[in-house]
C-alpha cells in the first residue's frame, strides 16, 4: 500500500509539473505571436506644426497633414483612411481640408533589427512601423516616411 501511495504521489507531482510547464509555454508562445490578422481602427497624428506655421508666415502654398483615421485590414492587406490637412494658401488664410483613400494596398515585412515590429509599406511608398501589443488586440504605430504616432485597435 505504501508503494502505491508513493507512486500515486510521484505521478500526481509529475503531472502537475507538466501541466504548469505546458501552461507557461502556451502563454509565452501567445505573447510572442506577431501575426497580423483581422482589421483594426486607427487614429494617428501627422502634424508638423512648426513647418505649417513657417509656411503660413512666409505666405507659401503647401499642405501639412494634421491627422488621419483609418481602417487597416491585415487579411486583404489594404488600408482606407481619411486624411485631414491644413492648407496654407497664400495670401489668404489657411484652412482645413480632408481627403479619403479607399483600399490602398500595402506590404508587410519584419523590422530588420527589432523582433515583433512589422514594417508596413503602402502602395504610395509611405511606410510605418507597427507593434502588436495586448495579445495583438492593439497596435502601436510609428511613421517612418512621415511624422506620425498613433494607435490601432482590433475591430
Image (tube, rainbow, N blue to C red):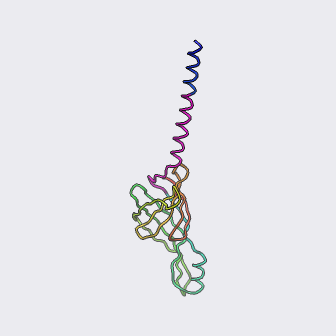
- The segment highlighted magenta reads 14-40
Q: Residue at x 46, y 65 (%)?
A: 81
Q: Is the residue 94 above or below the residue 47 in the image?
A: below
Q: Quadrant of the N terminus?
A: top right
Where 122 falls versus 18 (above or below)? Answer: below
22 or 119: nearer the viewer:
22
Rendered location of residue 73, percent (x, y):
43, 57
Q: Is residue 56 above or below residue 22?
A: below
Image coordinates of residue 120 in percent, x first then y, are 46, 63
Please state the horizontal and vertical placement of residue 142, each as a whole percent of the image: 54, 64
> In percent of the image, x 38 and y 57: which residue is there?
76
> What's the magenta bit mostly, secondary-structure-wise?
helix
Q: Nearer the viewer, residue 125 or 116?
A: 116
Please, which residue is most extreme toward the front here?
A: 3
Is 141 placed left or right of 78 in the picture? right
Residue located farthest toward the top when viewing the structure as drawn: 1
Q: Is residue 9 magenta?
A: no
Residue situated in front as seen by the camera: 78 or 21 = 21
Tell me the residue at 52%/56% (across/down). Answer: 115
Camera-nearest residue between 55 and 98: 55
| Residue 35, magenta (yes or no) | yes
Amino acid at each position: 500500500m505504501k508503494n502505491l501511495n508513493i507512486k500515486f504521489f510521484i505521478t500526481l507531482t509529475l503531472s502537475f509539473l507538466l501541466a504548469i510547464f505546458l501552461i507557461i509555454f502556451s502563454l509565452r508562445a501567445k505573447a510572442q505571436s506577431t501575426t497580423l490578422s483581422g482589421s483594426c481602427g486607427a487614429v494617428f497624428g501627422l502634424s508638423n506644426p512648426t513647418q505649417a506655421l513657417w509656411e503660413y508666415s512666409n505666405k507659401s502654398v503647401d499642405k501639412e497633414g494634421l491627422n488621419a483615421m483609418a481602417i487597416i485590414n491585415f487579411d486583404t492587406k489594404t488600408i482606407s483612411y481619411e486624411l485631414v490637412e491644413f492648407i496654407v494658401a497664400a495670401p489668404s488664410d489657411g484652412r482645413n481640408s480632408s481627403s479619403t483613400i479607399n483600399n490602398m494596398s500595402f506590404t508587410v515585412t519584419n523590422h530588420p533589427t527589432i523582433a515583433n515590429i512589422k514594417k508596413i509599406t503602402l502602395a504610395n511608398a509611405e511606410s510605418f512601423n507597427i507593434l502588436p501589443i495586448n495579445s495583438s488586440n492593439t497596435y502601436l504605430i510609428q511613421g517612418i516616411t512621415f511624422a506620425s504616432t498613433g494607435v490601432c485597435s482590433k475591430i
